[in-house]
Amino acid sequence: MINEGSKSFVHKNVDSDNELKLFKPFKDLCTHIATDLKACAACMRSSRSFATTLVEMSHSLEFAMHHLPTLTELSMKKERKHLAEILSDMSGRYL
């Protein structure tokens, strides 16, 4: 998941792979984040969706940071810490 992001589950065999529980670690991570989000904002209606969005956004932005630099300001420093700060800021604003 870390290196390949959505390529690990956006393919034609995703349903059978899901039945084999190959995505359980990814789902567990998203569930954990969603639980924490719900604890911070009990009225949040879409905590699982937002958690999944955060994880996917982190993958997409890190990829862009290294390979498609004009898509993100992160390309200036290319630091995961800066990416984490941006995601944290976005989360705070959303909450």
Image (cartoon, grey):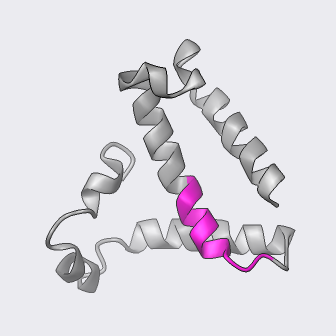
Give the residues drawn in magenta, as a range. Answer: 44-54
Residue at 85% across, 71% down: 41
Instruction: Tell me what residue is drawn at x 26 percent, y 62 percent.
Output: 10
Residue that extends furthest to the top in the rendered view of this protein? 76
How far from the left and from the top, in percent, is residue 20? Answer: 23, 82
Quadrant of image for the C terminus: bottom right
Identify the residue shown where x is 43% and y is 66%. 26
Query: Is 73 included in the stretch rendered in magenta?
Result: no
Q: Give left or right: position of 28 versus 7.
A: right
Displayed quadrant of residue 17: bottom left
Q: Position of residue 66 (x, y in %)?
A: 41, 23
Majority secondary structure in the magenta region: helix
**Residue 50 sits in which quadrant?**
bottom right
Q: Position of residue 63 (x, y in %)?
A: 40, 34
Q: Is 44 above or below relative to 76?
A: below
- 93 to 65, vertically: above or below: below
How many numbered circles are shown?
0
Question: Does 52 lie within the magenta span?
Answer: yes
Task: From this view, report whether residue 4 is shown above or below residue 32.
Answer: above
> Is 19 left or right of 91, judged from the image as shown?
left
Residue at the image point whose x is 43% and y is 31% from the top: 64
- Residue lying farthest to the bottom in this orientation: 19
Q: Is residue 28 left or right of residue 46?
A: left
Residue furthest to the left in view is 12
